[in-house]
Amino acid sequence: MLSTSSAALLALGSAIVLVVPGPTNTLLATAGLRRGMRRSAHLTGGEFAGYLVSISAWGLFLSHAATSLTWLPTLLRLASSLYLAYLSVRMWQTANSFSSSTHATIGLRTLFVATLLNPKAILFAGTIFPAAVFQSLGAYLEAMVIFTALLVPIGLLWITFGAGLGSGRLKRVNPVHVQRCASIILAAFSLSLAWAALHQVVRFSGSA
């Protein structure tokens, strides 16, 4: 089972990463924009399935690899912080181009594939989820319950956001400002990951 502090950090980290714009959230918002809330709500099932498969696969791989490659978790944290920094900059730069593309109807399969290939899954598996999650069935189930309890309402929030833009109910909400605020939050999270990774490097160097 996860400790209270581990569960709290898991919930906080998952919420921050799930709420920021990305491939999956863009598709959810676009579906809400085109089809409305009720006809798009089921798409969170595709998001859940994609993350479940991807996080589980990456988590098992990384937990086994880390036993022989002790530097891998630290390297992954640094890589994750760089990815989040890049995503933060891209979010700021593209804030004026909220997706309004005219692809074919977005369905469960589209959401599943997009989420399965979403780089956020590696971040969840290698950094946000504690290593114990992939070493104990009880911890794994507990972590997934916490993750799912956050994923569903956040996914529905993105669908609602898109539906509100489509109906004109959110005229006073500026998507540019929303995305740029999320960019700042993501940048702060990136710095915290980099600080933790560098602190771990210094600790290993001192004990060597």
Image (cartoon, rainbow, N blue to C red):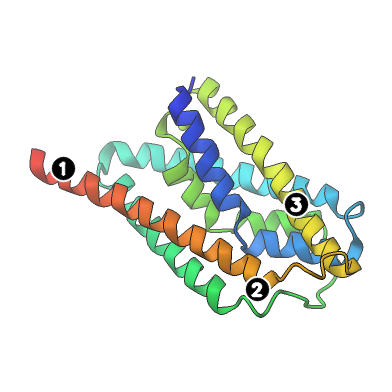
Near mark 1 (Cα within 10 A), the count class, few <14, some 14-19 or many ≥20, is: few
Which numbered disc flags the more N-terminal residue, 2 or 1? 2
Q: What residue is shown with label 3?
A: 157
Q: Amino acid at mark 2?
A: Val
Query: Residue 170: percent from the left, percent from the top?
Result: 82, 65
Q: Which quarter of the figure has residue 33?
A: bottom right
Near mark 2 (Cα within 10 A), the count class, few <14, some 14-19 or many ≥20, is: some
Q: What residue is shown with label 2?
A: 176
Q: Which quarter of the figure has residue 200?
A: top left
Which element is circle 3 on? helix
Tag 3–tag 2 contact (CB < 8 Å): no
Front: mark 3 or 2: 2
Which numbered disc flags the more N-terminal residue, 3 or 1? 3
Q: Can you say which quadrant of the picture contains the C terminus?
A: top left
- The relative height of residue 3 versus residue 202 in the rendered view (above or below) is above
Front: mark 3 or 1: 3
Q: CA distance from mark 2 to mark 1?
A: 42 Å
Q: Residue at x 42, y 45 (%)?
A: 127
The label number, if any, that marks residue 36 in the structure image:
none
Q: Amino acid at mark 1?
A: Phe
Which element is circle 1 on? helix
Q: Residue at x 56, y 31 (%)?
A: 143
Q: CA distance from mark 3 to mark 2?
A: 17 Å
